[in-house]
């Protein structure tokens, strides 16, 4: 087994990153009663365009989208039409910042590009809101934290997984010591053959672009656990492999539209039936050659589709985490083990299982179903509007659950995934 130093991020490395981030000043963003927050956005793929659409539709009273930037000129024009924003478009990031003078830069690019845009925005004197992950390797993590400290700008990481009703309730119960001190957490993530396969069609299948799903996807879950425990990860051991997608098939093509195996491949995906993808991607392929309907069996896939991670925390707690990306149904099974009881949360999509149960079982007592979970409409089960309200409408409101995710939270969540792939 590799030593902690060989795995790339040691206990000393984790704690050094934390100390650096804690020294950063926290400047405030615009609040109610002040002028609208001027936002310039870089990255106008599907997720970025959803961000822009929501800002224009639901937050137009508090924000103004002043510029859109993407390295693909056709895509940024298509995104502007879909967003419905009266904002200029750019392929040059510096020019956008200079000409639009935003208060805040929203980073929604491919994962490996996040850190470069975050740092450049700070160099240009701007606060930053970035999609997860903060970074895809430890060098990027340190560079972002150094830049935040050097330039004194504010960085927010958009972790919507903190904002699920069940996640917030779990945090509240743990704060109240409802099951005593947490000793360990068991976390299982299931991605089905629709959701899981989508990562292998897209750029995420390339480790150099996504940091593997340990970073791109699982940073959500590592952040949840870090937040629930209110403790720092200090050591990581992991195992992972590519056992289903990529090389694991006797036939393959470049992408689904030209595939000679359409009739026999269960993963054939007809992008021509999806107007949004046709406009944002297929119509823009001539600019950069990127194909949204890539073959899930391409042999250049160098990430893991199954992996297990163990994390040791500064407070003595342990996390055991597993993820599989080719399951017959979606879901999560989370067990939080305390010295006075256990919390169970099970969420499923398909498979015939009862969905969304949150239970607490105190030692020497019967299990209780937790039902006081306020429901909310919106993306990701209401988590997206909860996150955006916190950023744009509730900046000065009390935050008893600690929902606001700082650069330190972003660094730790990414570093768990980074340390995991270094371990593998």
Image: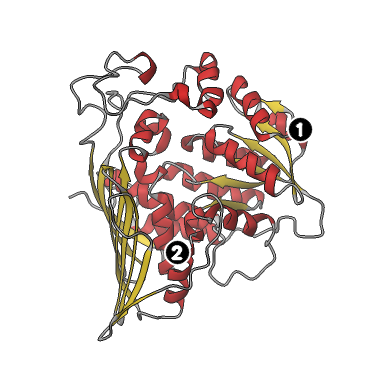
Q: Is residue 316 visible?
A: yes
Question: Which residue is rendered at x = 30% and y = 24% of the image?
Answer: 300
Q: How did the renderer colour the structure?
A: secondary structure
For the residue pair 315 and 192, the one nearer the viewer reads as: 192
- Say few, some or many: other residues with alpha carbon within 10 Å of mark 2 (under 14 / 14 to 19 / 20 or more): many
Q: Is residue 126 visible?
A: no
Relative placement, left or right, of 332 versus 77 is left
The numbered disc on residue 367 is: none
The numbered disc on residue 167 is: 2
The answer to whether 372 is drawn above or below residue 279 in the figure is below
- x, y percent for residue 30: 74, 55
- x, y percent for residue 40: 69, 38
Question: Which residue is rendered at x = 64% and y = 40% of the image?
Answer: 53
Relative placement, left or right, of 176 versus 85 is left
Relative placement, left or right, of 4 versus 47 is left
- x, y percent for residue 359: 35, 72
- x, y percent for residue 230: 44, 68
Q: Secondary structure at mark 1?
A: loop
Residue that extends furthest to the front in the rendered view of this protein: 352
The answer to whether 80 is drawn above or below residue 342 in the figure is above
The residue tagged 1 is 86
The answer to whether 381 is drawn above or below residue 294 in the figure is below
In the rendered image, which quarter is residue 361 located in? bottom left
Q: CA distance from mark 1 to mark 2?
A: 37 Å
Q: Quadrant of the C terminus?
A: top left
Q: Marks 1 and 2: CB-CB under 8 Å? A: no
Question: Which residue is rendered at x = 39% and y = 39% of the image?
Answer: 211
Question: Which residue is rendered at x = 67% and y = 62% of the image?
Answer: 394
How many dots with numbers?
2
């Amino acid at each position: 087994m590799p030593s902690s130093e060989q795995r790339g991020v040691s206990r000393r490395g984790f704690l050094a990153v934390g100390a650096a981030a804690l020294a950063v000043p926290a400047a405030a963003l615009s609040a109610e009663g002040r002028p609208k927050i001027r936002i310039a956005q870089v990255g106008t793929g599907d997720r970025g365009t959803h961000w822009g659409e929501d800002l224009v539709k639901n937050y137009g009273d508090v924000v103004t989208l002043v510029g859109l930037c993407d390295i693909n000129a056709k895509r940024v024009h298509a995104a502007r039409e879909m967003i419905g924003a009266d904002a200029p478009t750019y392929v040059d990031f510096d020019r956008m910042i200079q000409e639009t003078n935003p208060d805040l830069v929203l980073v929604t690019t491919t994962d490996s590009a996040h850190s470069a845009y975050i740092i450049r925005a700070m160099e240009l004197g701007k606060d930053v809101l970035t999609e997860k992950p903060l970074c895809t390797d430890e060098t990027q993590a340190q560079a972002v934290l150094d830049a935040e400290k050097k330039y004194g700008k504010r960085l927010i990481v958009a972790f919507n997984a903190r904002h699920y009703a069940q996640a917030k309730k779990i945090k509240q119960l743990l704060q109240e010591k409802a099951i005593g001190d947490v000793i360990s957490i068991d976390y299982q993530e299931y991605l089905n053959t629709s959701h899981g396969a989508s990562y292998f069609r897209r750029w995420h299948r390339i480790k150099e672009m996504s940091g593997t799903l340990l970073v791109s996807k699982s940073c959500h879950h590592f952040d949840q656990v870090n937040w629930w425990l209110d403790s720092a990860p200090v050591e990581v051991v992991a195992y992972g492999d590519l056992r289903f997608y990529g090389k694991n098939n006797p036939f393959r093509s470049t992408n689904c539209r030209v595939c000679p195996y359409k009739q026999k491949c269960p993963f054939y995906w007809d992008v021509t039936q999806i107007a949004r993808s046709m406009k944002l991607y297929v119509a823009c392929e001539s600019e950069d050659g990127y194909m949204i309907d890539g073959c899930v069996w391409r042999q250049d896939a160098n990430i893991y589709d199954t992996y297990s991670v163990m994390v040791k925390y500064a407070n003595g707690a342990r996390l055991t985490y597993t993820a599989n990306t080719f399951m017959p149904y979606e879901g999560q099974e989370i067990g939080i083990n305390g010295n006075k009881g256990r919390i169970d949360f099970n969420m499923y999509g398909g498979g015939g299982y009862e969905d969304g149960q949150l239970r607490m079982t105190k030692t020497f007592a019967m299990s209780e179903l937790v039902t006081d979970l306020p429901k909310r409409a919106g993306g990701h089960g209401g988590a997206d509007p909860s996150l955006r309200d916190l950023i744009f409408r509730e900046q000065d409101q009390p935050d008893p659950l600690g929902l606001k995710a700082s650069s330190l939270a972003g660094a730790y969540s990414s570093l768990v995934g980074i340390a995991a792939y270094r371990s593998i």
